[in-house]
Image (cartoon, rainbow, N blue to C red):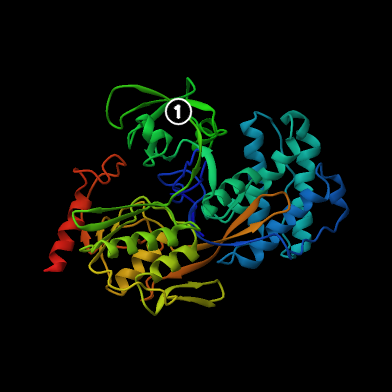
Amino acid sequence: MIDPMTAKSRALLAALVVIVVAVAGALFVGYRSGVASVHGSQGLDVATTGDVRSLLGGGQDDAALLDLALTKMDAVYYKPFSPQLPLNGEAEGIDALLKSKHVAGALPHETASGDQAKDADALATVLAYAQQHYAAKLGPDANTALTEAALRGMLASVHDPYTVYLSPKENEGLQESLDGGDFGGIGVYIYQLKDGTVVVQPIDGMPAARAGVKPGDVIDTVNGASIRGLTLDRVEQLIRGSAGSIVRIGVHPYKGKGEHSYSITREIIHVPTVRAKMEDGYEYIRLSDFGSTSADEVKKALLSGKAHNAKGYILDLRDNGGGLLTAAVRISSLFIPQGTIVSTIDRHGNRDVQEALGTAIGGLQPLVVLVNKYTASASEITAGALQDYHLAKIIGTKTFGKGVVQSIYGTPDGGALKITTARYVTPLGRDIQHKGIMPDVVVNQAVDPALIDTPADKQLAAAKAQLEALRR
């Protein structure tokens, strides 16, 4: 999964067909940035030895979660780290929770030995102490909250924004966004900017678009309540709901004035990741996410373009924070007949080479790929491969620069550990981490959802001009 978490991205997918594009916590909020492969919890050996485990409020389950997190971090994290870090991180995570609840407290200090079993016992000791001394002050579900805080702190200790613990609810949202299923909602993508502003991109033909919601509209209220200061996750929860129910949203134009209120009946909506159309003789394909259905959607759009004798193709990856690694390989293989698509490298230097699948359509020239600074992860894999093979002109601004890979490991509580397990390089061996991909043609444009695919879209205009030049 390219992860992004999201941002990323598309990041979380809400039941309103909310797609949170997560890009490393930069512009967007979510989980979707990062390349990831998905693993279940089966077959994971979790040590639960030590009498201290009986002191935990959640019993063996809490101990198992701590053991699992430490085991997986030790086994798969893509860089070596000090064994003291997870212990320090656990304490910092719990301290942060206590402070957020205005609970004064102190935790015992544990020193790592480097022995995994002993360090797991030390982690359990600290959590048991916190549960015994502070759970009563934290209210309902305090033991679960303390365990999740410990896990978040442990994974945050390596100072990698992509290595995180996902709660059961967060993991469910991530899996929904990857699966691209059917949901009760209003049919919009939502994005959160750095200043907390939440903007929408309605999906053509779906309830929000039919009601009159415009691309780039800023959400002010949901059911009469202000969303100011709320996380994107919370806004998503407020808008989502069962099919047939009504949600009222108040909006105003991005960088504009004029309040509008819409009462929208939620429907069961299939989440598309591609919006395609023939424009000026060119097949325009806007890909919002690299999900499980994306390759088939892109293929359908490309074949439609060929059937209508398209003069060229535009693949728009702007604001695309990533998704599944398999989707990146499948989509790239539609253009690249043979050779390496991407290589991942773990901390031991082991290299896993993903080759083209032999499914290239052929005749997809000329081709332009649009990118911007929030094009990340899976998007960068596809753009980088097409650039390396000289099969497309890349137009826009330098991409985000996310060149690391995450794997997702399910946990017994229904949550997940998302851990950076490798870095990746393009077919020519380019490592784009923190560097990004430089376009062949730089066209600066404000990152404004309301501009995309409009007469004011300078980057799209440049793409069409480039296609005309390539056809001569």
- Report the residue at 65% width, 28% height from top: 102
Q: Is residue 124 left or right of residue 415?
A: right
Most foreground residue, 135 or 220:
220
Toward which corner of the image does residue 241 lie, by quadrant? top right
Most foreground residue, 279 or 36:
279
Residue 92 horizontal/vertical position (percent)? 63, 44
In the image, residue 472 above or below residue 150: below
Q: Residue furthest front?
A: 307
Q: Residue furthest left?
A: 472
Is residue 199 among the parts visible in the rendering?
Answer: yes
Pointer 1 residue:
264
Most foreground residue, 186 or 220:
186
Neighbour tally class for label 1: few under 14, some 14-19, many 20 plus, Cα within 10 Å: many
Q: Quadrant of the C terminus?
A: bottom left
Residue 282 horizontal/vertical position (percent)? 22, 58
Kind of residue indicated by mark 1: Ile
Most foreground residue, 161 or 272:
272
Residue 267 horizontal/vertical position (percent)? 50, 36
- Report the residue at 47% width, 41% height from top: 18
Q: Is residue 471 left or right of residue 342?
A: left
In the image, residue 407 above or below residue 179: below
Residue 368 horizontal/vertical position (percent)? 25, 62
Q: Residue furthest top?
A: 224
Q: Is residue 184 left or right of residue 142?
A: left
Toward which corner of the image does residue 358 lie, by quadrant? bottom left
Q: Residue furthest bottom?
A: 339
What kind of element bears circle 1?
strand
- Report the residue at 54% width, 38% height from top: 184
